Image: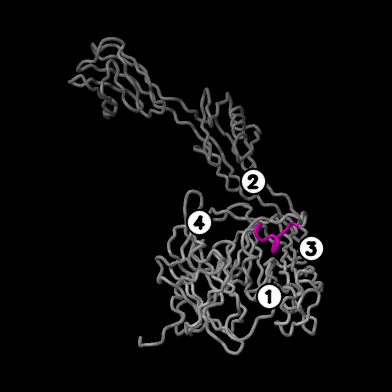
Amino acid sequence: GGRKPPDPGRGIGVLGECSLESVYPEPGQKEVPRNTMIIITFKEEIKVDTIIKANGYIQDDGRIKIYTTDATNYLKEVKISTNDNKTFVLQPDNYLGSATEYITYTVYLSNDIKKKADNQGIFSNCRGDFFQWSFEVSNKLDLTPPQVLNQGVFPPPDNEPDVVNFGAAVAAQGKIEVNFQPRPFRAASITDVAPVNSSPAASVSNVNRNLNQNGPLKITVSADALTASLENTDSHNQLGTAVISGQAVSFSGFFTLTLTSGSFSAGQAWTMMANAAQISDEITVGSLKYSFIESAPASQQILMGASVNETAARITAQLNNHPDVTAAASGTEINLSARLAGSGGNNIFLGVSNTNIFTVTPLAGGTERAVTRTIKDKRDQPRNAVIQIDFNEAINPLTVSGAAGQVKDYIKVVDLTDPSVFLSGKFVLSNQYRTVEFVSDQPCGVNSCGEQIFCLPANSQLRVWLKAADLDDCNNCSTRSPYTTCVNAHCQNAAGENYPLSSSALNGLMDLAANSLDGNRTNGAQGPQSEYDENIKNTNLGDNYQWSFYTSAEIEISAPEIDALQPVHGQDNFPLAEAIKIDFNKLMMSSSLLTGERTISNGPSIFKHKYLN
């Protein structure tokens, strides 16, 4: 309520919802260096020509604006790049701000920036039709190269594989004992068909094999000679009426009566004797059910033997074709064993329809193979681990995010059995451009939702390698005080330290002030001369960065849990400036800690998964 000046952060409600994912510098950030780049990340691909002109600069027709708060200085000389049409890196030709004062900048995005999929504005159906945010630019340059945080990688460096010994898994065992000959299936029959009084002779065909009627039946032709009725004369139950067709009348589910000669007329009748079908005793193993028959067995039918022992042998032969168990006969006993060793065999159902005929011992005793592990250095990681790298500041996304094949010259994961081949997958940048994660694209199973799990190679030593960007040459040393001396093609200061600016080639990792990666954490930039290895912490003067770890054959499928919250549920008077905190019992995948939702396909179905809302 009340009047107040315009809020430079208005429109911020759109950040994280609709099409916009994140921006850098952060809204309201203070003391941003003058040589910063600006990043905008969308949740879906953007029509490039609605944000980038043909010459590689930003569209300057008002759909994207960068200006000082008093709106007197709109920037147009801003290069803009993307490698996936979702994350855009904006780099002004000249430093922002002033060498003598702090200046606030605002970035404005309009709904005239279009989505690639449907050509709709990026803020269509959102709370607002634009987004703008502001940040304060200091009077300083950022000349500090970025580093990988100490203990900022997962899996952690591991110098020796674990020693794992496997015992044998045990298959579940069960038993069926045949005490007496089981009752076989016998088809129903109709006998003793006889005409009543002067009715013509007739015969019965198409008898339902499973007919459950027993006793005398009678068919009588109605007064109009168009239909006939069927009755059980013992119970006087009417079993149905059927329409006469020529010399035949068919009672659905029972049989067909056909005259030997002549035709149907009112009052004619026939009697017969029904012998109901004999239902077979049954054995059920897993999802398959077996019955018994006296001749010509079909699939999942067992031919009766002349003795109990012979019947047990024939049951054994049939169960040996079962996909889940094997069987062995010992007299009247049939011993069953799960085909796959392990505790899963304990869940194979074993049942019979008649416990007087059969005695059943359910399958039990299956156990998984015993695993003893001796951890060497660090515990080997499960195959479905996600690789995570945390930096101490935001990193230029163009060389560290995207498909593995796109960025293999700057960041890659290799199996040391063949280091020349990089692992396929995807690198994802998150956590305000400070965390890079690698997710394999090799499927290795499904989770409890039926969605695919993706895995690294099993029982392998893997190395992650990051390349520092080449340093800029000596062309402008005179303007880079105190790095004014050209040594070995690089500008240096009196202490022999290199000017950290990357070359324009964009051929390695750098921060958002274009400072090349400080892989060996010397607080200076040497460029990609050699590799710093986190496993051994060598002191080579080179800023490429690497570490290695081992994987096991295991797949981790237990879900993470929340241990603690701030504020607690229902808490009152929580300070407005305090952070909301969630403590998990596992290291979480940074790129999943987002707002909004994502849509995934699982077979023919489409599902929406919520993130943080």
The span from disc 4 to disc 3 (Cα, nearest Å) is 38 Å
Answer with mark 4 or mark 1, whichever residue precedes in sequence.
1
Q: Residue at x 71, y 54 (%)?
A: 458
The span from disc 4 to disc 1 (Cα, nearest Å) is 38 Å
The x and y percentages for residue 375 are: 76, 64
Q: Residue furthest top?
A: 261
The span from disc 3 to disc 1 (Cα, nearest Å) is 34 Å
Q: Which residue is mark 3?
A: 160
Q: Nearer the viewer, mark 4 or mark 1?
A: 1
Q: Is residue 592 left or right of residue 543?
A: left
The local crowd at label 4, few if under 14, some if 14 to 19, many if 20 or more residues have their Cα within 10 Å, is: few
Amino acid type indicated by mark 1: Asn
414 part of magenta stretch: yes
Answer with mark 2 or mark 4, whichever residue precedes in sequence.
2
Which type of secondary structure does the marked residue at label 3 adopt?
A: loop
Residue 253 visible in the picture: yes
**Which disc number belongs to residue 600?**
4
Q: Is residue 277 left or right of residue 395?
A: left
Answer with mark 3 or mark 2, whichever residue precedes in sequence.
3
- Between residue 333 and residue 124, name the one nearer to us: 124
The span from disc 2 to disc 4 (Cα, nearest Å) is 38 Å
Answer with mark 4 or mark 3, whichever residue precedes in sequence.
3
Which type of secondary structure does the marked residue at label 4 adopt?
A: strand
Q: Which residue is mark 1?
A: 515
Q: Residue furthest left?
A: 223
Which type of secondary structure does the marked residue at label 2 adopt?
A: loop
Q: Where 349 falls versus 423 (above or below)?
A: above
Q: Which residue is mark 2?
A: 172
Q: Nearer the viewer, mark 2 or mark 4?
A: 4
Colour approach in the figure: one colour
Q: Is residue 334 left or right of residue 221?
A: right
Q: Is residue 140 left or right of residue 282?
A: right
